[in-house]
Amino acid sequence: MIEPAPAVRPTRVRHIVLGLTVAAYLITYMDRVNIASAVPVIQKELGFSMITVGWILSSFRWGYALFQIPGGWLGDRIGPRRALALIVTWWSIFTSATALAWSAGSMATFRFLFGVGEAGAFPIATRSLSRWILPGERGFAQGITHAGSRLGAALTPAIVVLLMAAYGWRMPFFVFGAVGLLWAAAWYWFYRDTPAEHAAVNTAERDLILSAIGSARPSRTQSVPWRRILGSSTLWMLSLMYFCYAYCISVYLDWFPKYLHDYRGFDLKHMGLYASLPLLAGTAGDLMGGWLSDRWAMRSGDLKTARRSVAVAGFLLAAGAILPATFTTRATVSVWYTCLAVFGLETTVGVSWAIPLDIGGDYAGSVSSVMNTCGNIGGAISPALLAYLVRWCGWNVPFAVASAMCVAAAALFGGIDATRKIFPDPAR
């Protein structure tokens, strides 16, 4: 009697792809928040007012918002392997160029061009995972990638303070730019647009992916069906929700170190430490939100409720925690409540970014680019508006506005249905 051959275990190339994507997200946030920790020193050396800094911070976000759709289109058009390597190289160059700024205008220009490059990062990365990650892993995958971004943001204040103390405020921009160039080279060398193109993927892993996702479509599309995408009511509800989210998280990414230094009285050393803590809490929130949503969906079979409930709860937690963080008179207590607020806010992110995969299929890059465009218009308004609100009303009002935005986001997410696909599933 001939015994059957032992089953071949699937390779884990998709997990390496996910790991590289997590590293990309980490780098995006290290590069975008390094300036926040350097603001007190930059203001002192170059003589910028708070209003000027607000517009410099906004310039990045306007470039980031306006080029989301072109960035997503680029990934869908030429494939994420080439597109992501290209844009990471671009933004790494302008990360380093920030250190060469000699005026407010030059710094705003460099930050705008840096934002143009980073604009395609999340839509293209979402597209890069669409042909690799199994449907039951999508919430967790989006959670862990965004956890990587928040971990990068959490590590950055301490790194920037150390580098500034030793070499001045320009050195962090050169160092972070070099890290991005190394990542771009590694991505282009390892990643392939579909599992079928990757030599390290064995038949078992290829069959596992194809059985879950369906037969592979071409890795590069000739056209993007924008009429159908823009006709989705689910997408527009998602986009309005993400406007509220991005407005709120920008408050913490762009201004929290300055708030701790100027309003709560922390020196630069302690500012670096305490500015990191809420973003570390956010990292945990990113991991938990995506994982919990996936587990709920797998056990209940109800994807709509699983996505919706986790996100609504996260926004309401954030809204509730922002208020005591704002109005307490104790500086360290404010930081701990802020940790809870950012944790709640970030539990929504993996869920939000899983929905373009749920509803967009092979056009997830373009779908997510629309969501992120609207979101980052909120993110672009936030830094400059906060500077004016602080001048007119003090520091408490901007955080009260952020709490109200979280309530609005919870209400909007209550109307989002992750099962309303824009495109039918590919043939299996």
Image (cartoon, rainbow, N blue to C red):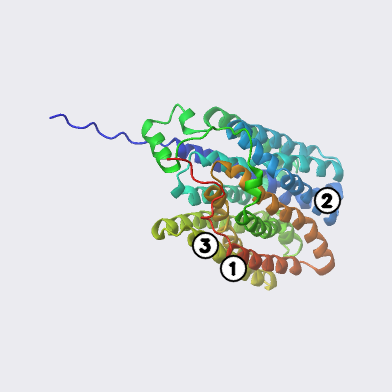
Residue 316, numbered circle: 1
Categorize mark 3 by other alpha carbons within 10 Å: few (<14), some (14-19), many (20+).
Answer: many
How many discs appear? 3
Q: Quadrant of the C terminus?
A: top left
Disc 2 residue type (three-letter)? Lys
Cα gap from disc 3 to disc 1, whole angstroms: 10 Å
Whether residue 173 is visible here, answered yes or no, is yes
270 over 162 or under it: above or below? below
Please state which of the two labelled residues, at mark 2 or mark 1, is closer to the viewer: 1
- The residue tagged 2 is 44
Among the two numbered marks 2 and 1 on one chain, the one whose residue lies closer to the N terminus: 2
Mark 2 to mark 1 CA distance (whole Å): 38 Å
Judged left or right of residue 250, residue 428 is left
Residue 310: which disc?
3
Foreground: 407 or 403?
407
The label shown at residue 205 is none
